[in-house]
Amino acid sequence: MNIPEIFPGAKLHFAGIGGIGMSGLAQMFADHKFQVSGSDRGSEKPENQRIIGALRNNGIQIFPQDGSFIRSVTPDFIIYSSALENDNPDFIAAPDIPRIHRSTALAAMVSGMNDCVSIAVSGSSGKTTVTAWLAETMFLCDMAPSCLNGGLLNRFSSESNAGNYIHGDGNYMVFEADESDKSLTAYSPDFAILMNIGIDHYSKAELISVFGRFIAKVKTGLVIERNAYECLKNLIPSRLKVVVFDGGDWNLNSCRHEKEKFLVRINDLPEFELPMNGRHNAVNAMAIIAMMAMLGISPQYTILSLNEFKGVWRRFDFAGRMNSGARVYDDYAHNVEKISSCIRSAQELTPDGRIYAIFQPHGFAPLSFMREDLLPVLERTLRTIDRFIFLPPFYAGGTSSFKPTSQEVADEYNRLGIREYSCYQERDAVKVLLEHECCADDLVLIMGARDNSLSSWAKSLTG
């Protein structure tokens, strides 16, 4: 890949700057003294102000995504993501300005950071949490990392920092490498963590190819989950130091609840507490311990910081209790594996109560892709007392087939499955249902990506 020369102080315009990845990258470039502006079609929506407000507070000028930016700024480059279509108004308004994909811009930035050890975190599930948790653990271990993430770190969130970019004074850069548009193949990190390979945006065969190209560019060390290792072992370069977790060099011996504590035992380490429940989070912690060990930090020192993690916004966030006493949680879960893990975590918290799992697909195409694989997982995961409710897919604009609808998928699941699947067209109708049915022992789980209003809605359900 020819990494473009984004010269120091260049003027950069981010088309779609409100996106979780784009906003963090814009903050990173602004932090490194580039002149940054941006546009977003949702820039004035209240649910997006946590991100847009932080960008404005950093001196970044925000425009509507209607091409009007060109009357005020003349950028040297337009930075864009795969979410943008070719007929985007910003592209049409400035056809002669060179465009650089988000991943290429990040690759250029990381390669230009002197004496920097870069760590990329990827995988079908868990990468956002692990990126945040690793960076925060390194921060607590006085390693002062920089971090660019696809989620907002609660510890670092403020009016001038949404939390998806951290400026660090150390020699480490931790970043999330997203496979959803195959852009992770742009990176050549020193180290990488590969969490898993699951069904999400592509077939498993295609994901193996994409992740294979990613690890081929890793320079020094790879921490990889066992099942992913089995899929990719013939593609791993011999130069890499490889550590396998969750069945290999690092193993989860036990995880259990004791009153309000979630305790895990990994390898021969003493049992220790984690701030989040669920086997998947124990595995996440194991990956972090393995990477820290690869960087020369003892596991005993690492686990002292793991329980201090403040979490990531919309990752099993407790929103409060309904008037009935039912707990409400908000989560970004949007693919098969994440939905299953989220429901299982909720079941652990309320073994005797019902789970009301409410899922808003993050688009029509993602719903179509997961349609076949989600049903058997739900059939295995949901208990008889639990309920699964679809909301209509989130639509952010642009070209769409508007197929399948959530109602069509729910009807199909009811024909093929043994459980009942519901679809509600309006959130208010779901709220009425919950207020009528939920009891103190029940748990309401709001799931879905891209739509920040889900978090506000989850809080509105509470008393």
Image: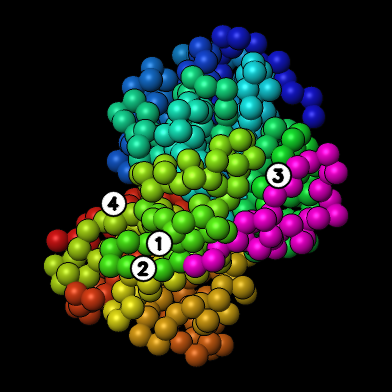
- From the top left corner, tell me how far across and down residue 447 is, in percent: 41, 61
The answer to which quarter of the image holds residue 390 is bottom left
> Element at badge 2?
strand
User: Which is closer to the viewer, label 2 or label 3?
Assistant: 2
Choose between 84 and 114: the one closer to the eye.
114
Separation of marks 2 and 1 at Cα, in angstroms: 6 Å
> Tag 1 or tag 3, which sits nearer the N-term?
3
Q: Report if residue 59 is visible in the image.
A: yes
Q: Is residue 230 magenta?
A: yes
Separation of marks 2 and 4 at Cα, in angstroms: 30 Å
Choose between 21 and 139: the one closer to the eye.
139
Separation of marks 3 and 4 at Cα, in angstroms: 38 Å
Circle 2 is placed at which residue position?
257
> Element at badge 1?
strand
| Residue at x 67% of width, y 56% of height | 249
> Tag 4 or tag 3, which sits nearer the N-term?
3
User: Which is closer to the viewer, label 2 or label 4?
Assistant: 2
> Tag 4 or tag 1, which sits nearer the N-term?
1
Query: Which region of the structure is painted magenta?
Result: 226-254
Q: Is residue 220 magenta?
A: no
Q: Given the image, on which type of amino acid does mark 4 rest?
A: Ser
| Residue at x 60% of width, y 47% of height | 290
* The label number, if any, that marks residue 222 in the structure image: 3
The answer to which quarter of the image holds residue 95 is top right
Q: Would you call the spot at circle 3 few (<14 residues within 10 Å), some (14-19), or many (20 or more)? A: many
Circle 1 is placed at which residue position?
263
Circle 4 is placed at which residue position?
456
